[in-house]
Image (spheres, helix red, strand yellow):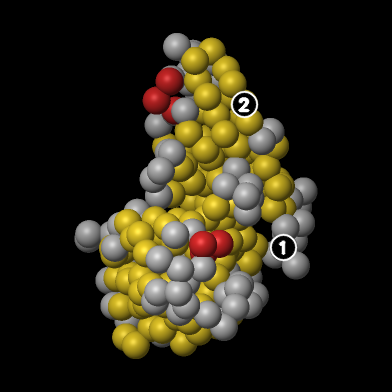
Amino acid sequence: KQEVTQIPAALSVPEGENLVLNCSFTDSAIYNLQWFRQDPGKGLTSLLLIQSSQREQTSGRLNASLDKSSGRSTLYIAASQPGDSATYLCAVRDNYGQNFVFGPGTRLSVLP
Amino acid sequence: DAGVIQSPRHEVTEMGQEVTLRCKPISGHNSLFWYRQTMMRGLELLIYFNNNVPIDDSGMPEDRFSAKMPNASFSTLKIQPSEPRDSAVYFCASSSRQVGGELFFGEGSRLTVL
């Protein structure tokens, strides 16, 4: 059974710092991996999707990498801003079924 | 596209009442998911459909919960009778493997059972 963990559970940084969020999964037979952002009281917004054949994806100040063999993905946020404060979740979709398994999320606070 | 559309956005009801949550997936998506989110348990998968057929309902907590997908553009999640512990935010999401399998969420339905 696929299990997804995220470290750290919470992170507080001053504005302008570059930061890395980590996601680990136990079964490397994945179809894709997706990073989401959730603001308080809101739904989940898709940030980046990495297919199993890809190593990384970039969107603006965000860069996500994928290492299937080690069961890890990282989300890199450059030059963080207070508006980046939110909970970040990763989810993996397996090759067998079509289900997505979510991590518990990392709660990020960027202080002005 | 309008995205995944859920209704109602907020529902307050009394214990024992029937609750029906509705979802319209993104047009062309063939997979639909119902999730529940609480502070204590995080995001939990309740059930998902592929091509309108329920594939895995092992996350449905009890017989009080039921879900249907009568066609490709509509799904319902019903709770009967509702209980205070059902209070949560219920999310619907959809995806299509034909376009990379990206998952898109609705805004959620916040349910409060008194």
- Pinpoint residue A46: horizontal percent, then vertical percent: 43, 48
Determine which residue is flagged by label 2: A11
Residue B81: percent from the left, percent from the top? 47, 77
Q: Which residue is more in the foreground, B113 or A14?
A: B113
SS state under label 1: loop
User: Is B40 placed left or right of B67 in the picture?
Assistant: right
Q: Earlier in the sequence, mark 2 or mark 1?
A: 1
Q: What residue type is labelled 2?
A: Leu
In the rendered image, which quarter contains the C terminus of chain B? bottom left
Splitting the image into 4 quarters, where does residue B76 fall? bottom left
**Inter-mark Cα distance, 2 to 1:** 25 Å
Above or below, comparing residue A21 to residue B4 in the picture: above
State the residue at coordinates (39%, 45%). Answer: A42
The chain that hosts pointer 1 is A
Side of A25 where B34 appears, left or right: left
Residue position for label 1:
A2
Residue B64, percent from left and from top: 52, 80
Image: B51 above or below B42 = below
Q: Residue at x 40, y 49 (%)?
A: A43
Check disc 2 and report its element: helix, strand or loop.
strand
Quarter of image, res B1: bottom left
Q: Where is residue A62 in the image (x, y as percent from the top left)?
A: 48, 33
Which class describes the residues within 10 Å of circle 2: few (<14), some (14-19), or many (20+)? some
The label shown at residue A99 is none
